[in-house]
Image (spheres, grey):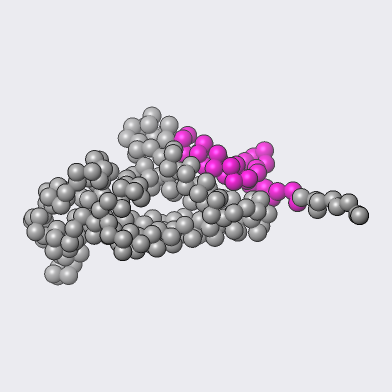
Amino acid sequence: MPKIQAASNAEQREYTKRAILDSFGQLLYSQGLTGLTMTHVAKTAGVGRTAVYNYFADMGELLVAYTLDETERFMTELRGDLEGVENPVEKLGIYVRAQIDDLSRRHLPPGPAMRTVLSPEDFEKLGEHVGALRGMLTAILQEAIDDGFLPAGDLQEMGRLVHSSLTATADREAQSEEARAAHERHVQATVLFTLRGLGAQFDADGAPIRREPQPPALSVAV
């Protein structure tokens, strides 16, 4: 059992729950969802298998709790990073960078894999919560369009372009100085590639600039 470090039973329960979630995340990152069991989680967390079931009824419930917890943490950190930033293209860059860094630190199984362990109700609950994160991206995209930094487009398609770029380019967290330098170059290139793919333009110093207004289409009088 974990060493008691809390002043009350409520704090101890929260401490144990956090240990279970963190251990689940470590195992998910290192070996993926396939073959992962509550026994593995309990052993890594340093608690009894029964203790894990006191908090989570099954692997599906644990997966939902972990995903919601990680998404909430990410959104809180992202809001802090965006605070005080005015240019919407810079906000998009921060969003993309934050997502890449987050994906390099943790690993969540894709939707089809989640469906194999989640009930339809849990999967829907997960989708609603993750939708809040997508809503943040949609708001930034809309702001960039309204301010003239991006061309008008389908916001859902633009969001899919961003997330598909992230999924395709995310790598594991760098350990050595050389790997960290390579990771930073990789992140910078991905951010720029994604922003240009959305239609962002930059001056010679790399600062975002507004797009030239398009002249109205000519019409031929009949």
Q: Is residue 129 left or right of residue 43?
A: right
Seen as rendered, the residue at the extreme top is 178
Magenta highlight range = 184-213
For residue 149, say whether it is visible. no
The image quadrant of residue 141 is bottom right
- What residue sits 35% from the left and 38% below the top? 172
Residue 143 pos. (x, y %): 60, 59
Q: Is residue 44 left or right of residue 105?
A: left
**Which of the pair 158/89 is nearer the observer?**
158
Above or below for 176 versus 162: above
Above or below for 177 versus 75: above
Q: Is residue 15 left or right of residue 84?
A: left
Residue 182 pos. (x, y %): 43, 31
- What residue sits 51% from the left and 56% below the top? 137
- What residue sits 59% from the left and 54% below the top? 154
Quarter containing the N terminus:
bottom left
- What residue sits 67% from the left and 41% below the top? 203
The image quadrant of residue 125 is bottom left
Q: Is residue 133 magenta?
A: no
